[in-house]
Structure formats: structure tokens, C-alpha cells
Image: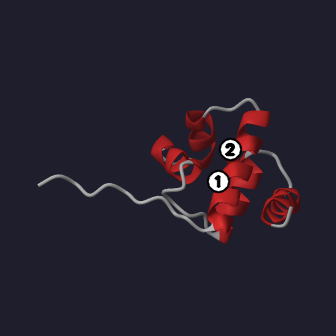
Amino acid sequence: MYPQRLKAIRSPAAHSVAAVVARARKRRGLSQRDLAALLKRPHSVIGMIESNQRQVNVPEFLAIAAALDAEPTDLFRQLMRELDP
């Protein structure tokens, strides 16, 4: 039996969170592995977030912002701009 393929999360908000996290990570010059190490999480977690296979909860969003040395409110504003262009 083959493992089921993970389905991408299709909500616009989930896609925007993934995009905001990826952009902020790249602006800091971090790889997915670098960010995962800062969060003390497996690198696959960041890959799954950025490929829309895993949602981010609020405490995790705050931890990601802290790891990126970013203000959570700034990241949230970027997220809101993505959702309401």
C-alpha cells in the first residue's frame, strides 16, 4: 500500500501565510533548514508550511516571527494585504 499524498491546503489565507513566511525567511537570508533549526523543528515542517501542506497556528506564527526577528504585527499586515489587495 502506498502512503497517501498530502493534499495542499487551498484556503486563500493559508496560501498567504505560506507566502509571507517564505518571503520573510528569504529576506533574512535563511534557508528552510536554518529557520527550522531556530524553531527547533524538523526542516520538513517549514517545507510543508511553504508548500501549503501544513497550516500555521497562532503560537507557531508568533514563534516564526520571533525566529525571523520580525514583528508579528508586520507579518500579519503583509498577510492582510495579500488577502485584500
Above or below: residue 2 compared with residue 43: below
Q: What residue appears at the point 57 percent right and 43 percent down from the top-left corner?
A: 36
The numbered mark at residue 28 is: none
The amino acid pointed to by label 1 is: Ala
Q: What residue appears at the point 46 percent right and 45 percent down from the top-left corner?
A: 44
The quarter in which the N terminus is drawn is bottom left
**What SS does tag 1 mark?**
helix
Which image quadrant for residue 79?
bottom right
The amino acid pointed to by label 2 is: Ala
Q: Residues within 10 Å of mark 1 (few under 14, many from 20)?
A: many
In the rendered image, residue 56, in percent from the top left (x then y), is placed at 60, 63
The numbered mark at residue 22 is: 2
**What SS does tag 2 mark?**
helix
The residue furthest left is 1
| Mark 2 in CB contact with mark 1 (< 8 angstroms) | yes
Q: Residues within 10 Å of mark 2 (few under 14, many from 20)?
A: some
Cα separation between marks 2 and 1 = 6 Å
Per the image, the residue denoted by label 1 is: 18
The quarter in which the C terminus is drawn is bottom right
